Amino acid sequence: MEGQAFFISINNVITVVWSLLSLASALIYLLLKPPLDIVSSSILVAVGIVFSVVCPVKAPSRKTYREFKKFDWEVEVDPGKPKGENEHDVIVVGAGIGGLTCAALLSKWGYKVLVLEQHYQVGGFCSSFARRGFVFNSGVEDVSGLREHGPVTHLLSELGLRGEELFVKNTRRIVYKGKAIDVPNNLDQLIELLAKIFPGEENNIAAFFNEANKAYEECYREVPLYGAPCQQSS
Ligand SMILES: Cc1cc2nc3c(=O)[nH]c(=O)nc-3n(C[C@H](O)[C@H](O)[C@H](O)COP(=O)(O)OP(=O)(O)OC[C@H]3O[C@@H](n4cnc5c(N)ncnc54)[C@H](O)[C@@H]3O)c2cc1C
């Protein structure tokens, strides 16, 4: 519902802009002589077209940015001030990947940070445990955002780390109807494999991954606007 109201408000703004431009155009024709009237009015039409194209593209991201901004909070912290042994600029509760990342960045930016963790090991859901010779993920098995300009690549470089040294490419095996299927890491090969397993579904499988790919691209499209996780707000 909120999205619908926002869509209507964008339409209203565009309508108002076009009304004002039409009004200005009418005044131009009344007040100016040819060819100045035609030139000025054409400029106004061009402005209107650019606005109508740019506004619906930019407005949703601006709105989301403003919504996120509401949750920004500021505290008086002076990393330059000398601190006692038990004094800290920031205390992070929880050494999951979120807390650890946050603490690492703050520490790099000169804050004295204390991380408190209730568990006997760090990492939260981004960790693993061993049982009877097997290693199990607590949660995370895939990390996205590691492409060249991806946010995780950006975050790692800010922390002086390199993805290639931290992550391993896992192989996967799915057991489907009693048959072991080795899942390729390459998307084209995966689509080919699925098409063989589900004959007649080639087009649907390709369409699904096409949509998934678009969603992925969309997730990271606004990174320059919102900032990657390690970008300090200006
Ligand atoms: C089954 C599963 C699979 C997933 N797979 C993926 C995946 O493939 N890729 C991906 O990107 N994401 C995946 N996720 C999501 C990802 O695991 C989480 O988004 C991420 O790990 C959350 O990190 P976090 O630091 O916010 O929280 P957590 O990992 O939950 O860490 C919170 C930490 O805080 C500690 N803590 C909590 N309360 C206190 C307290 N009061 N005092 C002290 N310590 C406290 C906890 O012990 C824990 O260590 C998966 C999640 C699950 C559950």
Image: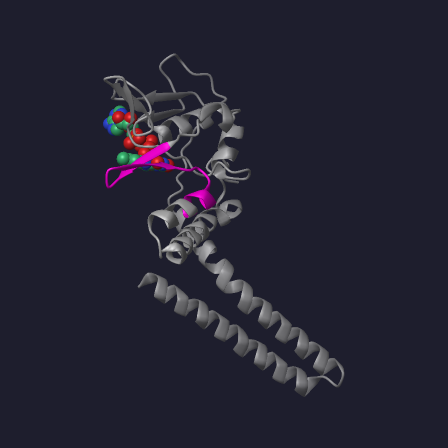
Which quarter of the figure has residue 94? top left
Residue 221 rendering spot, x and y as whole percentages: 50, 49
Q: Name the quadrant where ligand 1 sits.
A: top left
Residue at the extreme bottom of the image, as rendered: 30
Above or below 148: residue 9: below
Q: Residue at x 42, y 47 (%)?
A: 191
Check the image and tell me how it is coloured.
one colour
- The residue closer to the viewer here, 97 or 62, is 97
- The residue closer to the viewer here, 209 or 100, is 209
Residue 59 rendering spot, x and y as whole percentages: 48, 60
Magenta stretch encompasses residue 149: no
Q: Residue at x 71, y 82 (%)?
A: 37
Q: Is residue 205 left or right of residue 29?
A: left
Q: Is residue 109 visible?
A: no
Q: Is residue 121 visible?
A: yes
Which quarter of the figure has residue 127? top left
Magenta stretch encompasses residue 182: yes
Quadrant housing the N terminus? bottom left
Residue at the extreme top of the image, as rendered: 85
Above or below 218: residue 52: below
Residue 222 rendering spot, x and y as whole percentages: 49, 49
Above or below 171: residue 29: below
Q: Residue at x 23, y 17 (%)?
A: 132
Give the number of callouts.
Answer: 0
- The residue closer to the viewer here, 233 or 228, is 228
Residue 91 rendering spot, x and y as whole percentages: 35, 25
Question: Which region of the structure is painted magenta?
Answer: 172-191
Q: Is residue 35 left or right of residue 142?
A: right
Q: Is residue 167 left or right of residue 141?
A: right
